[in-house]
Image: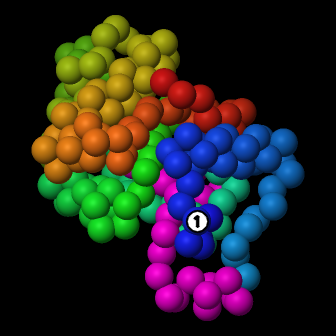
Amino acid sequence: MANDSRPTAAQAWQMMVEGNGRWQRDEREDPRRSAEERAAAVAGQTPAAMILSCSDSRVPAELVFDLGLGDLFVVRTAGQVVDDAVLGTLAFGAGALGIPLLVVLGHSQCGAVKAAVSVAAGQPAPAPSTLGALVGDIVPVCEGEGEGAVAGAVDANVRRVVAQLTSDPSLSGAVCNNHLTIIGARYDLETGAVLEV
């Protein structure tokens, strides 16, 4: 979608769902990845969607959605945890770039969520200590122990971040004016499927 015709949020999501289907079936089109398309992209960007996803190396957004250069505006942090830098980046995408869709993308077996589930169960915080702030944001949505608790906390964390972004002053105006839609989703590492949360 790296052209002048910007899709709506619903169209952008449909494009992503279709691309994810190709990814799951191993029928990738690998769009907009040539040297010519790279040169064409120098003139500017009009991404169809923003993605706030985990920094896990197994969840590269452009591959998971079978999209290419200029299609997605991606921000990645462990556990999709939001700080001022993330908020500023997303606000730039919504405001300056006019991106209509923001997808908060969690994933199965998330290490940050696993750490938060452990801390919520009374186990020591992970090292290094700088991880404490990341994990601390996730702990309030954690209940129980084990893999079931991790799976539930992954979805709960996605919903928490969607609510946080929707109500943040830097994005809430765009949401209220229907210029930005924020949705949550989860990527399954085993199947490659992305499902709304």
Rendered residue at 20%/44% (across/down): 173
Count residues near mark 1 (Cα–Cα under 10 Å), then give few for <14, some for 14-19, many for 20+: few
Query: In the displayed structure, does residue 18 sit left or right of residue 52?
Result: right
Residue 49 on the magenta segment = yes
Rendered residue at 38%/30% (across/down): 158
Instruction: Determine whether 75 is above or below 176 in the image.
Output: below
Q: Which residue is mark 1?
A: 5
Query: In the displayed structure, does residue 93 sit left or right of residue 33?
Result: left
Instruction: Determine whether 164 is above or below 77 in the image.
Output: above
Query: Residue 148: x and y, percent?
Result: 48, 12
Rendered residue at 61%/35% (across/down): 194
Query: Residue 130: x and y, percent?
Result: 17, 50
Q: Which residues are magenta?
A: 35-63
Residue 81 visible to an observer of this rendering: no
Determine the image quadrant of residue 81.
top left
| Color scheme of the displayed model | rainbow
Instruction: Determine whether 144 is above or below 93 in the image.
Output: above
Q: Amino acid at mark 1?
A: Ser
Rendered residue at 50%/64% (across/down): 47
Secondary structure of the residue carrying numbered label 1: loop
In the foreground, 100 or 128 = 100
